[in-house]
């Protein structure tokens, strides 16, 4: 099957009429009839029931059309992949993420990316995850890195890694023995002072969902827009805080508070890359996402 043969047969199957198909293909009706006969001869079976009006497919013809569509789809995918390999060998990729994730991710993946794409510049737009999502949607950034929690389903996404949210305290809490760390029952924390991120933050929404599920009514003492500030205040004894594991790993050298999983299995969410559904990822985009994902394998 060559591409021309496939396109001709599919057009006849679509029109269910050789004359109409010939007009749309800009060939004569006798030429198209001869083309079909030749294709059927090569196949060793009839593709169309020519005695019916409109024209119908034989059983062999139905299989032919199904396979032909798959072949065209594979050819288009291959063409796109080849174009992607050639595409974005130079230029710029805009990446939206928080300053904390920029610190924990980019130093570990950009050297390899620069080796593969030395002429592609990565420009970061660092902001809250809510703004990252909006920037992706408006086209300010091409790819965003956010927690895949309560985000717009109009965007395409790819999970990069699993992240645990941890409870931070300056003093020991009643806890249970766990695998990598002890865990606390969040329900026992009702009435405690908490340092929370400001409303509208994705972590704040996740924390409020935990509180609602377990009937926790905290006494909020301080709000901040920065995870590291929240961590440091919890370490200083201002109150309890819930922060991502990545923040704990960054800040532990400075202050070593008590860190607990929330519940026996911990509270986890996925961190992922997002992009607009109408955006075709280039080879450089795909490689960047792959490197980000491999950072946590």
Image: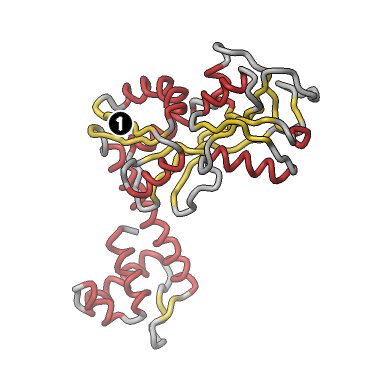
In the picture shown, does residue 244 fall above or below 208?
above
Q: How is the image coloured?
A: secondary structure
Whole-percent x, y for residue 17 in the image? 33, 82
Q: Is residue 13 left or right of residue 148?
A: left
**Quarter in which the C terminus is drawn:** top right
In the picture shown, does residue 45 fall above or below 222?
below
Q: Count the numbered circles shown.
A: 1
Q: Please name the residue shown 62% across and 13% down the image.
A: 256
Q: Please name the residue shown 32% across and 23% down the image.
A: 114
SS state under label 1: strand
Whole-percent x, y for residue 25 in the image? 23, 72
State which quadrant residue 106 falls in.
Answer: top left
Judging depth in this view, the residue of 220 and 167 nearest the camera is 220
Judging by the rendered image, the residue that carries numbered circle 1 is 123
Judging depth in this view, the residue of 289 and 171 nearest the camera is 171
State which quadrant residue 37 falls in.
Answer: bottom left
State which quadrant residue 2 falls in.
Answer: bottom left
Is the residue marked by circle 1 packed among few (<14), some (14-19), or many (20+) residues within 10 Å? Answer: few
Q: Please name the residue shown 44% across and 61% down the image.
A: 67
Whole-percent x, y for residue 260 in the image? 70, 24
In the picture shown, does residue 297 fall above or below 138?
above
Q: Please name the residue shown 32% across and 36% down the image.
A: 94
């Amino acid at each position: 099957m060559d591409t021309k043969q496939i396109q001709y047969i599919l057009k006849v199957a679509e029109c269910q009429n050789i004359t109409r198909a010939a007009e749309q293909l800009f060939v004569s009706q006798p030429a198209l009839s001869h083309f079909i006969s030749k294709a059927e001869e090569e196949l060793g079976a009839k593709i169309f029931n020519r005695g019916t009006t409109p024209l119908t497919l034989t059983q062999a013809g139905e299989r032919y059309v199904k396979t032909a569509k798959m072949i065209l789809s594979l050819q288009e995918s291959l063409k796109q992949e080849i174009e992607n390999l050639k595409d974005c060998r130079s230029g710029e990729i805009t990446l939206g993420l928080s300053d904390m994730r920029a610190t924990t991710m980019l130093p570990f993946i950009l050297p390899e990316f620069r080796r593969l794409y030395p002429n592609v510049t990565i420009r970061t737009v660092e902001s809250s995850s809510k703004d990252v999502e909006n920037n992706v949607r408006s086209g300010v950034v091409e790819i965003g890195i956010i927690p895949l929690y309560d985000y717009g389903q109009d965007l395409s996404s790819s999970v990069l890694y699993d992240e645990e949210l941890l409870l931070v305290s300056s003093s020991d809490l009643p806890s249970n023995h766990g695998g990598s760390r002890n865990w606390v029952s969040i329900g026992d924390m009702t009435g405690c002072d908490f340092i929370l991120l400001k409303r509208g933050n994705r972590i704040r929404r996740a924390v409020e969902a935990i509180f609602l599920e377990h009937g926790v009514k905290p006494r909020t003492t301080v709000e901040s827009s920065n995870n590291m500030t929240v961590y440091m205040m919890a370490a200083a004894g201002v109150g309890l805080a819930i922060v991502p594991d990545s923040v704990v790993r960054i800040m532990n050298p400075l202050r070593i508070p008590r860190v607990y999983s929330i519940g026996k299995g911990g509270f986890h969410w996925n961190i992922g890359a997002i992009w607009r559904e109408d955006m075709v990822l280039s080879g450089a985009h795909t490689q960047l996402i792959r490197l980000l994902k491999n950072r946590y394998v």
